Amino acid sequence: MHNSLFNSMDFTELGKVSDEWTDFVRNAPALGHSKLVPGMDPVAARALVESSRARPSDADLSAKGLNVRTFTWTDPTTTQKLQFRLFMPPEAAANPTQVFPLYLYFHGGGFLFGSIDSDTADCARISTSSSIMVLSANYRHTDTHTFPSQHDDAWSALQFVLSSPPELTQVDPTRILVAGASAGANLALVTALRAGAEVWSFSPLSSPIRLSSLNPRPDPNTQPGR
């Protein structure tokens, strides 16, 4: 019975190139990483990689009609300055009293590469496709600041969000998603764990924080190392 059902199914569509892939190949920028050489100065290498990652951003933003704001905030506890880029979906401007979930995003890049410019196109797509606010937070890199500076900056970014700043008046404080890619996913994981341990230890179930790790995927069954 199963064989006859399988034989009657039409899989010919799976052998064709999808429109989504064709669009990606047409519009994806050149990587530009071939110019990286062993022993290259870390600052120069980072600038090279970031320039290749940032190319699609301007065209993507203009096509999606997003309201984008870039600003700097100083952590009152550490006096460390952090740079943010806020992506507001078109619905936010049309409905100034409406509040939206917030997607707090940390870029990837091995704690060396990346910036709020490098992942602008991705943040724009997330904001428009899901009708949410996306806040991309920059953090210090390892060529100038060693561990745990990056994790401290990520924690400060979450504190900024939770402080109800005037820049985030249209954010729903009960719906916050901490997210990241690669090294940024590490920052998101550590920040979310720290938030659960330090901020809402009296009632973990009431925490507004949710976690999204784009890469790598966390294993909920893994025991923490010691």
Image (tube, grey):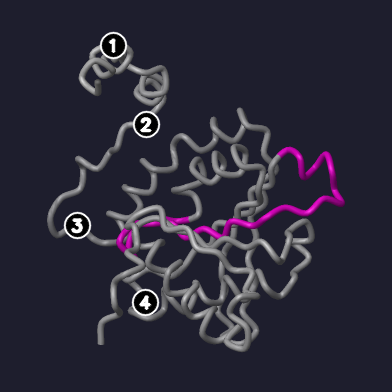
CA gap, disc 2 and disc 3: 23 Å
Residue position for label 1: 8
Residue position for label 4: 145
Instruction: Please state the extent of the stretch shown in magenta in the rendering.
Output: 90-115
Q: Is residue 71 left or right of residue 10?
A: right
Q: Position of residue 28 (x, y in %)?
A: 38, 29
* Residue 93 located within the stretch drawn in magenta: yes
Numbered badge on residue 29: 2
Nearest-to-viewer mark from 4 and 1: 1
Lower sequence index among marks 4 and 3:
3
Residue position for label 3: 40
CA gap, disc 1 and disc 2: 41 Å
Mark 4 falls on what kind of element?
loop
CA gap, disc 4 and disc 1: 61 Å
* Residue 110 located within the stretch drawn in magenta: yes
CA gap, disc 1 and disc 3: 58 Å
Lower sequence index among marks 2 and 3:
2
